[in-house]
Image (cartoon, grey):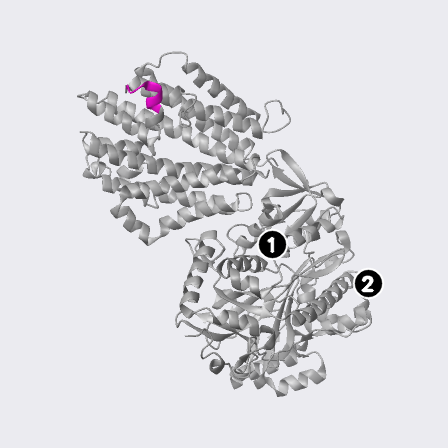
Amino acid sequence: MISRVADHCFWFGRYVERTESTARALAAAGSLALDAELPSAQVWRPVLVVSGEEPAFRERICGGDDAHEAWGDGEVVQRFLVWDEATGTSVLRSASGARSNARSIREVLSLEAWEAVNELYLYLRDDATLARYTQHRETFYQSIRRSTQLALGLARSTMLHDEPLDFLWLGVLLERVSQTARILDVHHHAVANHPDRHEVTETAVWLSVLRALSGGEAYMKRAAGRVSAESVARFLIAEPAFPRSIAYCVRSAYDRLCGIRPPDAHDLPGGRALERLRVLDKWVTARRAEPIAPRAVHDLLTHVVDEVHEICVTLGSELLGAEAPR
Amino acid sequence: MALFAGYPEAALPGTYDEMFAGETARSSFARIARLLEAITPDELARTQHLAEAALMQQGVTFSVYGDARGTEKIFPFCLLPRLVAADDFRRLERGLQQRLRALGMFLDDLYGEQKILAANVIPAEMVLGAAGYRPMLRGIVPPGGVRIHISGVDLIRDANGTWRVLEDNLRTPSGVSYVVENRLISKRMFPRLFDAARVHRVDHYPTRLAETLRSVSPVGDDARAVALTPGPYNSAYFEHSFLARTMGLELVQAPDLFVDGDHVYCRTTRGPTRVDVIYRRTDEAFLDPEVFRPDSVLGIPGLMRAYAKGNVALANAPGNGVADDKAVYPFVPDMIEFYLGEEPLLEQVPTYVCLFEEDRSYVLEHLHELVVKAVDEAGGYGMLMGPQSTEAERDEFRRRIIAEPRRYIAQHRVELSSCPTWIAERGTVEPRRVDLRPYILTSREGPWVLPGGLTRVALARGSYVVNSSQGGGSKDTWVMKE
């Protein structure tokens, strides 16, 4: 497979996943703002942190002021993270990114997968959508989630299951690992540092995190109705059967990369990325065997995010043509 | 109100209408005209709207150059099909095959022994001075012996309905993806009508193209063929990707390819892989900076060395531009007689070659009624539109023609036939001018004509300009079965 094309497949996957995760995080925060008795800045600021856009928001929206009222203004935060074209991870930018990568590899994607992502882009560009966003916020986020799921589902059900799809899913999975890690980390931090910790509020926060990751029901099946910081962290980090847990995504990413570059194919490029991913998988799996102390969660998640970053850089240079072989 | 109410009255004077002869539909199309008549303008408006939405949704678009947001537009499309009668197309088919055979032999000869120049059938200075002639390619025989794998020949019908060749496109003709996509849309929008109409299919074009490419492979059937595009910002990118997708080829850009030991390789996730056939949609000036344009960043250094060694087939072959040059066009009928010993089956537009003294004096006396073109300039530059020109412009051209007669040819303005076309703003069907570009694939076995083609239509009232960049649109072309 052509390295440049593999790169587009990988980034197509990442952007689609990013579109969805931003939409999920915003929908969950909107719901949390209604449920929990939290100051609204504590609802919205974490979403900015998770998306990596906190510094940009501080500078462009708040004029550098950490006490600016915009931090707690859900409408401002949502506009910034949905529609702002200057925001790197906004829904609009991510969907455009997905589409422009898809457009460069239209002959690789199936027609139906392409149409799904093209429709999502056109939907966001349509003036009628802005009206729907204003009137039915929840329906809007739901449409985004359904479109991204449709695009990924169609990719899986209408494309050949070979290298291009492997790269696409590798992108989805690695993006999802970091997303889960960051969302968990940010909320862990917020809850742990809250001055007057209240059980009801805490439960609302954790349910919101689970909702943002579509994990509410799955979690309950494992935890039998008990919600605690530790068990939520354990579920999202180590549960092997939940498709958005770190353990699941890292293992699946490793399996995908094995399909692209088998572990015994020593003459093929990609060996360093594969090894690094294997080590990370082993490390995450080992976390399952021992209790996860609340104080260790942040370091653990930081390790995961850093490793995923390194793996992506290595993939870029070994397989995706970031350093052309000649 | 009936769909064609008022249509015959709106006929353009001096123009052949494809569908109607006076008040009534032409006999070959009477049945389809009745079927179309059953559609109300409201229905057509609705269906047309649906069709445009479908094209946008599928991303059947072209990029608009110079637009920072990378805007894409759909190629305006009129749902009312352009009909071509079975016997008309049969004659066109034979004429196009003959023309393509002769043009192929001309290129072989020109990049070989140059017998046609020695026999003085075409003045050597017209050919060797043409911008499309590439002397460095002389002596190279392309793999499979084919040079014009893909061509699109622009045809018009004059006031009497006679088909005439306006232009040959033998380099990287585009538009065929719209032929296939337009057909999908008309089948979807008019299923019953289409079924009743008995129309030749066009959806096998990509398969035939893939066969054509395989037929010229230097390594036999296991050839790895790729499609080469300048990239997503090229205005025809949709088509490049469409063809790659429907042929199952990888779509590559120049940086994906490199040459080592006179073989072409592709950079892949498994290391370098050999490439044997390149269906190239980049202009030849940007193919290989070692040979054509040293300043090009788009090329593949060494590609022409690999080509000269016969290690890679290029479709189309570089160097074809000389055969679709304005300076060479007037001599195509002579080529057909010289190489095939046959009478040309297709008419073309009578052209005065200013190099010839007799033609030149006619042109100089009739500047006010002729269109004069400089042979080495395209896109309307270096052109005199006689009927609209001023005295000063005519004097300027008179001076230029006398100074460098070789550079100029002249034609009478051509009439284009008209076709019933949906005019959305007014909700009516009106005559609009059209041309036709059929596509011809030439494999080792010879030329094959796709029974269909791109009908371009000048959507503005009274206009002759069918280009998509200037208010042109397209129609599905229905070639009737016998």
Q: Residue at x 74, y 62 (%)?
A: B104
Q: Chain of mark 2?
A: B
Residue A241, relative to residue A44: is it above or below? Answer: above
Numbered circles on residues, count: 2
Quadrant of the frame with the N terminus of chain A: top right
Q: In terms of depth relative to the viewer, which is nearer, A114 or B143?
A: A114
Marks 1 and 2 close (CB-CB < 8 Å): no
Q: Point out residue A139 in the picture as x, y percentages from the top left corner.
A: 30, 43
SS class, disc 1? loop
Q: Chain of mark 1?
A: B
The answer to whether residue B57 is seen in the rendering is yes
Disc on res. B282: 1
Q: Earlier in the sequence, mark 1 or mark 2?
A: 2
Question: Does the magenta-highlighted stretch encompass residue A105?
Answer: no
Q: In terms of depth relative to the viewer, which is nearer, B358 or B251?
A: B251
Three-letter amino acid code of the residue under disc 1: Thr
Q: Point out residue B324 in the picture as x, y percentages from the top left corner.
A: 67, 66
Foreground disc of the pair 1, 2: 1
The answer to whether residue B288 is seen in the rendering is no
Q: Point out residue A158 in the picture as x, y percentages from the top left corner.
A: 52, 40
Quadrant of the frame with the C terminus of chain A: top right
| Residue at the disc numbered 2 | B113
Which portion, as a residue range, is magenta? A219-226
Three-letter amino acid code of the residue under disc 2: Glu
- Looking at the image, the residue that sits furthest to the bottom is B365
Q: Main secondary structure of the magenta part?
A: helix
Left or right: A27 as drawn, with respect to B234: left
Location of residue A20 by image quarter: top left
